[in-house]
Amino acid sequence: MAQASSEHASGRANVTATLPPDVDLHARPAANFVRAAMRFAADVRVGTGDREVDAKSLLSVLALGARGGTELRVSASGPDAGAALEELSACIATLSD
């Protein structure tokens, strides 16, 4: 489930999306997410809790250690930020093992 994005003073747009309850962000789902993020020119970040990492770095995304049901924050800035947030929130909602 994704929540609407908002614009911050930094010029970054944000959205939150929840991992499916039965999917941890391990190698395969994380790689699918990173591949989706890499299709965009925007600077894309993903975070949970107080951590935020480069969404285009597989090792960084894996290091989040996100478990099923975790709410992820995705932020983006750049020419295609809106499209990136829309696609990545949908990607998170449909990840599978």
Image (spheres, helix red, strand yellow):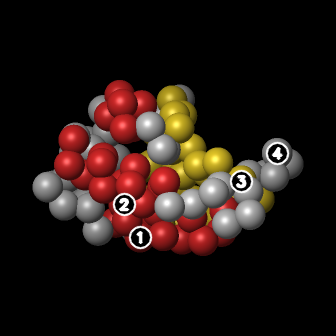
Residue at image position (49%, 54%) is 38
Instruction: Check disc 1 and report the residue beneath it.
Output: 90
Say left or right for 56 vs 93.
right
Q: Nearer the viewer, residue 49 or 83?
A: 83
**N-term mark: 2 or 4:** 4
Q: Secondary structure at mark 2?
A: helix
Closer to us: mark 1 or mark 3? 3
**N-term mark: 2 or 3:** 3
**N-term mark: 3 or 4:** 4
Closer to us: mark 3 or mark 4? 3
Instruction: Check disc 2 and report the residue beneath it.
Output: 92
Say left or right for 94 vs 80.
left
Q: CA distance from mark 3 to mark 4?
A: 9 Å
Q: Secondary structure at mark 3?
A: strand
Name the quadrant containing residue 94: bottom left
Residue at image position (48%, 55%) is 37
Q: Nearer the viewer, residue 25 or 50?
A: 25
Name the quadrant containing residue 95: bottom left
Q: Is residue 21 above or below residue 62?
A: below
Q: Is the C-beta separation of discs 3 and 4 under 8 Å?
A: yes
Q: Is the C-beta separation of discs 2 and 4 under 8 Å?
A: no
Q: Is residue 83 above or below residue 92?
A: below
Instruction: Check disc 4 and report the residue beneath it.
Output: 10
Give the label on residue 77, or none: 3
Give how far across and how far down residue 41 sits, in percent.
63, 57
Say which amino acid is labelled 3. Ser
Residue at image position (56%, 44%) is 45
**N-term mark: 1 or 3:** 3
Q: Is residue 46 above or below residue 22?
A: above
- Residue 55 in view of the camera: yes
Q: Is the C-beta separation of discs 2 and 3 under 8 Å?
A: no
